[in-house]
Image: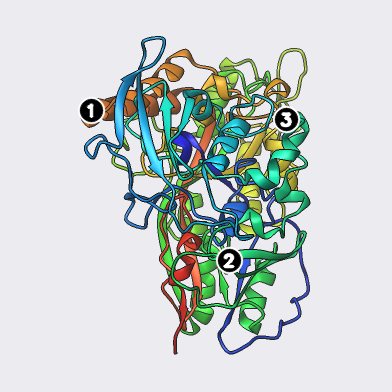
Amino acid sequence: MGLRGRRAAVAGCLFFLAAVLPAPAKAARDELVIGITQFPSTFHPNIDAMLAKTYILGLTRRPLTVYDKDWRLRCMLCVKLPTIENGLAAPERTPDGKQGIAVTYTIRDDANWGDGKPVSTDDVVFTWKVGRHKKSGVGNMEFYRSLYRIDVKGPRTFTMHFDKLTFQYNAINGFELIPAHLDEANFTDPVAYKNRTAFDIDTTNKGLYYGPYLIDRVVTGSHVVLAPNPTWWGRKPHFKRIVVRVIPNTAALEANLLSGNIDMIAGELGLTVDQAIAFEKRHGGKFNIIYKPGLIYEHIDLNLDNLILRDIRVRRALIYAIDREAISEKLFAGRQPVAHTSVNPLDWVHADDVPKYPYDPKKAAKLLNDAGWTMRKRGVRHDKKGKRLGLEIMTTAGNRSRELVEQVLQSQWKAAGIDVRIRNEPARVFFGQTVTERRFSGLAMYAWISAPEGVPRTTLHSAHIPTPDNNFAGQNYTGFRNAEMDGLLETIEVELDRSKRKKLWRRLQEIYATELPVIPLYFRAEPYILPKWLKGLEPTGHQDPSTLWVENWRAQP
């Protein structure tokens, strides 16, 4: 995963939209209208991990490094991928004697911001300065802590000095550059910066982007219009205009596709598998439908500050009381296999010999009895003091599949004597505040998407729990604290031997499945519903979205 641990949270739908949107006037295949189901909470590339933002910014920016569709690391903004073998990366000792590494990158000579200003080492240093500040709100604190120095070698060349040598030493996918000439003035107050960056107060400024497209217009909650970037160095993009239209309700999303108001539904942020299967049965002959399995898993975060959930017996009872196999088969036609940890079987570090929790109501009942939840009043368990066994579950409002899963879970937990109440929110609120600031009281259901062999440091390490003191940076939303897990995450990063690393990964998954800071549900596939005339779009199956290669998209008869 980019930035050695960054993950992107995947939202669903925001609210119900009953009417079909009015059809835009289209030129002959020189406009592409994409339907997605959420609107970004921010356009700043390094604040808030939200896939809607990543998807849109993929049209406008290029990371220094990226994983391609074959899951290989490659340069995008840089000239040559640094390796120890080619001499652009060199192990070294830090000033305090640690094993570190110096990694040298050169930005492309023809890379310019949309306002013509060269993309330079000024931007590199400023991005590092923002990320390193403890109050900036930038998510991956560990990356910026480890990156203790940057040496500027010239206008486009720089050397990063890290205080540890990791197996991902040259993968800086999430080090998204910020234009110093536009945003530095907004950083005079680092605490307030999160809410007044140029990306949010001046989103259509050309100088914020250097990819094939520029953001030309934003209608909050509705759509984003993109136009070709005249300073783009690569292959000229085919479409003269791209509109990313947010249609939160999936029924309305389908209706707009069929009416021609949108041309495609993004696989990254569109229909769920069950919806796509039903759509294919009715209209499959009119579209190209691709199901892309990938490194994305649906799960339920458990707030471990909740006294009920702090008890491991309750956490295990919760998972024993739900029939995840039945959910996968009946709701998703078996296309989304049950997850036992966060590591997908598609990833080479996946371990199958970890604790598993098949549907077993009797075990769930025994665990709850052992935990003191023995008395039943109107079907709900209480403890000996009369306290009700009640929890709240939240997810992104309007997502038909998620809300259906919630109802199934609620029913199965009710059968076990657990009273679970549903309270959903629009994705911008859910991710912009509720999850990122740990405001959910009990259960939060959503998905993570990661890069190949993405070390989940930001989601599982105790140093990455969001708090007011760190301006809610970090992605350990459960509040999970486990000393052995902390040590494993730190050790995996610096273990260069693959066989040894795989053993460490196995232990990580074992702890994950034993301690259950989350309830893993299933691994998702992404259904792309594309017009037959659109060529060149290739899904990746990981967190680097297909939009990063938009210049290859073409309209053909």
Q: Nearer the viewer, residue 271 or 118?
A: 118
Q: Which amino acid does label 3 sit on?
A: Pro
Mark 3 nearby-residue class (10 Å; few <14, some 14–19, many ≥20): some
Q: Residue at (73%, 23%) from the top-left corner?
A: 468
Near-viewer residue (436 or 106): 106
Picture coordinates of residue 375, whole percent (x, y): 70, 21
Q: Distance between the residues labelled 1 and 2?
A: 41 Å
- Give the mark nearer the N terminus: 2 vs 3: 3
Amino acid type of the residue that numbered disc 1 sits on in the rendered structure: Asp
Closest to the observer, 189 or 354: 189
On screen, residue 304 above or below 269: above
86 versus 377 height, above or below: below
Give the number of the mark in front: 1 or 2. 2
Q: Nearer the viewer, mark 3 or mark 1?
A: 3
In the rendered structure, the answer to whether residue 15 lies left or right of residue 556 reads right
Query: Quick one: SS at disc 2?
Result: strand
Disc with the residue nearer the chain's start (1 vs 2): 2
Residue identified by numbered label 2:
213
**Quick one: 552 or 20, which is closer to the camera?**
552
Quadrant containing the C terminus in the rendered view? bottom left
On the image, the x and y values in percent for residue 556 come to 44, 86
Q: Mark 3 points at which residue?
A: 190
Q: Is residue 62 above or below residue 261?
A: above
Helix, strand or loop status at disc 1: loop
Q: Can residue 527 be seen in this view?
A: yes
| Residue 273: percent from left, percent from top | 50, 61
Left or right of 81? Residue 531 is right
Query: Which residue has dot 1 on it?
Result: 497
Left or right of residue 527, residue 496 in this image: left
How packed is label 2: few (under 14 Cα within 10 Å), some, or many (20 or more)?
many
Find residue 284 and name its label.
none
